[in-house]
Image: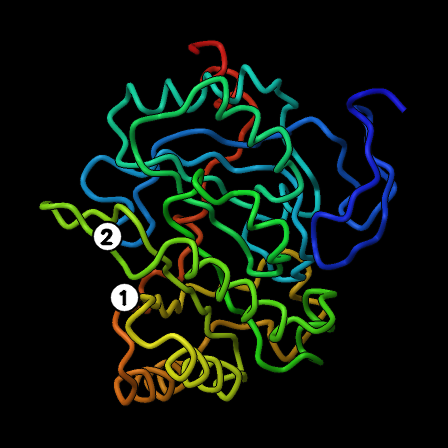
Amino acid sequence: MNNDSFVCSLCPRNCGALRDERGGDGFCGLGSQPRISRAAPHMWEEPCISGSRGSGTIFFSGCTLSCVYCQNYCISAGRQGITVSEYQLAGCYKKLEEMGVHNINLVTPTPYIDSIIRSFDIYRPSVPIVYNTGGYEKPETLRRLEGIVDIYLPDVKYSDDSAAVRYSSAPDYFGTAMKAVEEMVRQTGSPVFDDDGMMKKGTIVRNLILPGMTGNSIRILRALDESFGDKILVSLMCQYIPEGRASEYPEINRRITKREYEKVLSVLEETSLEGFVQEMSSAKKEYIPDFSPDALRQFLSSI
């Protein structure tokens, strides 16, 4: 094996895949070099992340999950994107920082963690670093990011492991995600904000309400309250749109109802958790980012 080849155990699957520059034979099917699908200011994160100038978001191709309903299915499952060097990745940070973004936001970055760590040796932005993930993470892998990541933005998608397997091919999802959040909170501590209300450090846990699965979200909120309380913020999301392969699963091939939304929201209000709640109007395709290769090529040519 050359220096860019390794046997991978970065995510909880521990599939022992051989990954090199050309690709990999594991669950994610990804190679060792970073592959990105978008780099641009992003206005649709939580207010303390996007602010007035946007979050400097880099969407990585591929994912440790396999969510059948993923809004970004073309990049998560389809792995659409452009392979970049660590120097180019560092150049993306610098360019986004020059554009005035509030932070650098790495979306589904875990398969490329080795290259990402090296890229920050090349250039470390002066703005906070956000690690944006589906929550299916190993604490051992996350510990390598201590001192690099300022803000963690994980999902906790499922309390029901049978649903996690059915919709995301993720066994033992809930226990795994909760241990990951524990490690994230250990690193970041309680939320810290600047004078403008922008987050400087902390963990925001997201939960996306899924059709017919209000009990799932309610159990997650109660578990987060019991385990973390005011050490985290939560973001309750109602933007679900049946994308990807959702049409193959009739029970989730619809948007959530107002009644489902209000049922979960009422439980959130009973907890001590603080954070953010989306409006139901956010469930629109217009909020799905533009992953066109031409837009990315134009950005890369400017760094």
Residue type at mark 1: give it: Phe
Q: CA distance from mark 2 to mark 1?
A: 8 Å
Q: Which mark is residue 276?
A: 1
Q: Residues within 10 Å of mark 2 (few under 14, many from 20)?
A: some
In terms of image quadrants, where is residue 165? bottom right
Q: Nearer the viewer, residue 163 or 9?
A: 9
Answer whether labels 2 and 1 touch (C-beta < 8 Å).
Answer: yes
Q: How many marks?
A: 2
Residue furthest out toward the left:
195
The amino acid sitting under disc 2 is: Pro
What residue is drawn where x is 46% and y is 58%?
184
Checking the image for residue 162, the label placed there is: none
Residue 106 on image: x %, y % = 48, 39
The secondary structure type at the circle numbered 1 is strand
Quarter-wise, where is residue 138 in the image?
bottom right
Q: Image check: 218 left or right of 165? A: left
Residue under label 2, please give it.
Answer: 47
Please provide percent x and percent y for residue 231.
32, 68
| Disc nearer the start of the sequence (2/1) | 2
Look at 67% across and 73% down and name the residue there.
164
Q: Position of residue 198 (x, y in %)?
A: 20, 47
- For the residue carrying disc 1, how many other residues have a C-alpha within 10 Å: few (<14), some (14-19), or many (20+)? some
Query: In what quadrant of the picture does the N terminus appear?
Result: top right
The residue depicted at 52 percent of the width and 78 percent of the height is: 211
